[in-house]
Every structure is written in structure tokens, then in C-alpha cells.
Image (cartoon, rainbow, N blue to C red):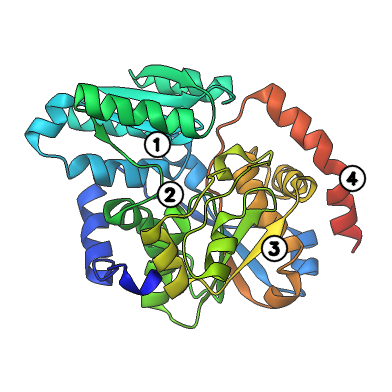
Amino acid sequence: MTDSVDISGMTLDAIRATHAELGGDIIRTPSLPLRSALVSRMLDGGTVTLKMECFQHTGTFKARGALAVARSLDDDQRARGVTAASAGNHAIAAAWAARRVGASAKVVIQSNANPFRVAKAREENAEVVMKAPGAETFAEADRLVAEEGRFFIHPFEGLNTSLGTAGVGLEMMEDAGPLDAVVVSIGGGGLISGIAAAVKQINPGCAVYGVEPQGANSMSQSLHAGKPVHLDRVDTVADSLGAPMALPFGHALCSAYVDDIVQLDDDAICAGMVAFAQEAKLAVEPAAGAALAAVMGPLRERLAGRRVGVVVCGANIDAEGYLKLLSRGMAPFAAYSEG
């Protein structure tokens, strides 16, 4: 249960210390105002500041948590190398982080992963193993731990992971000026758990809203159940948000610090990608599109007139896949715009 999970290590001092330790290797991504008459109208004069984690090393926020974990390894663990299980983004980040600390990486990527992400992992000098999505991917990573002695860098669970991602929230609160709310997409919870812990300890009055696909809503279900939930099935175009479960540490942090989670269907997520393209001139992956779609949709009334931070969590997508999803999002974006 949540109350048995120790989250005492997620202090603001610890978040600041981790951020300082990673500072020489991690990009302090910009927080930029979204200059959009449409979004301003939709929010009744409210403002949106974009936290540009799509400009982070490896193209997503994942580099922060992966490096925080990799930097914690001892010499023997580094010598034996690391592994990871991923739909792509975390594999890229784990390989990058391993290279930064002088370790080898053998990463397991789901067979349905975007080929662009597989290629990016190999560019980071990772040996890539492809396995069927879900249990087979994690089972292969477990085998590499057992048989090769590699250290498993989890995609979203653990103190160091959340301390790493908390830097996103810390930077937003320092760089974006006063914020009334922050909106973050949720996969397994590694990003929002860190951001929420940082934001709420700096300004308890700033709301933290999570966004999940309807077809991958493990954190919503977990918070409702009061314990981590595993999904029988995941179905969403936002593959980066397709974690089939929540886990105890991330769930406990979300229970403590997240105000609410909203859910979107895939058409709405694609509409968010269109909004980024047309209003911010940014090409992003579906996981990032979900955050802006939530601002325009289910969170719109709650955010009216407020100062809102939106985390642009990543942009690792190939041109062909991007164009297909953009086309899918045009009609629902028009509906948002006219509403």
C-alpha cells in the first residue's frame, strides 16, 4: 500500500543536490512562452509556458533519470554494464547515460517500437535486442541481469529516477515565473512523480495535473484503487505513455503530490500534436501532444485565466509516422478550436 512506501528521500534538498550533480551533463532546457492567440482565447486570457524537454539530450526527459541512476553505480556495476526495457526513448537514454559513465549497454526494445528510436539507441553505441511488447521485453532484461550481471535501469521507478526528473520541475519553477498549474503526461509515472514532488515542495498552491491515454491509464486506476495496478491490455498511439502498470514508489509520490489526472482518447492526443505544430511550430511525439491537448480539452475550464506550465516531454518520432498522426489530429483539433 502507498502508506508503506518510503518517499522521504524526495526532499527539496535532495532534488536540488541531484540537479546540481547532473548539471554538467544535462541541458537546462528553456521555458518559453507559447505565443498563441488561439490558446489565450481558449484559456480566457490564461498563459502557457512550454518546458522544452524535447531539446534535452536524447530528445526526451528520459536522459535525466537514466543519468541519475547511472551516476549512482559503483565501479563493479559499471564494469558489468547496464540494460533497460523500453518502447524506445528510455533505451536511448539508458545507452546515452551508460556511455557518459563509461559502461556498456545492452538494451531490450519492444518489437513494435518506432524504427527511428531503435536507430537512435544504436547511435548511442547500445547493443539492441528486440522482443515482443510487454512481458517478453522485461523478461529478456531480467535474463541479462541474471546471466550477464548487468544493472537494470528501470524506465520509471525508483528514487534516483524521480530525483533526476524532479529537475524538470525545479527548473520550471525557477525559470517560468509564478505558475498556477503544471500539466505533465504520464506513462509509468517517472516524470510526473519527480516534477510533482519538486513543484509542490516549492509552491504547494501550484496545481499538478497528469494526463493519460484512455488506453493506458494505469496511474489513474492505481490512484482510484489505492495501490499500484497492472493493466491487462494497453492500446494507444502514444507508445511512450504505454506503460502497463504503475509501481509503488511512483504511485506513492503521485498520491502525495498530484492533484488530478485526466484521460484522453487517441484522436485528442493527435489534436495536441497539431496544436504544437500550428501554434508553437514544434514537431513533437504523441506523449508531448497529450499535455497540450489536455489544456485545450478536459482541463480548459480549470485553467481559465491561469498561468500554466506544460512539459514538452519529447520529440522522438520519424517523419512518416508524424505525418500520419498529424493527419488524424486535424479534425479533432478543429473541433477544439471552434469550441
How crowded is the residue under tag 2: few (<14 C-alpha within 10 Å), some, or many (20+)? Answer: some
| Rendered view: 326 above or below 34 | above
Q: Which residue is mark 1?
A: 57
Q: Which residue is mark 2?
A: 29
Amino acid at dot 4: Ala
| Rendered view: 59 above or below 181 | above
**Element at badge 2?**
loop
Q: Position of residue 230 (x, y in %)?
A: 52, 51
Amino acid at dot 2: Thr
Q: Earlier in the sequence, mark 2 or mark 3?
A: 2
- Cα distance between the residues tagged 2 and 3: 21 Å
Placement of the C terminus among the 4 image quadrants: bottom right
- Cα distance between the residues tagged 1 and 3: 26 Å
Amino acid at dot 1: His
* Badge 4 vs badge 2, beta-carbon distance below 8 Å: no
**Element at badge 3?**
helix
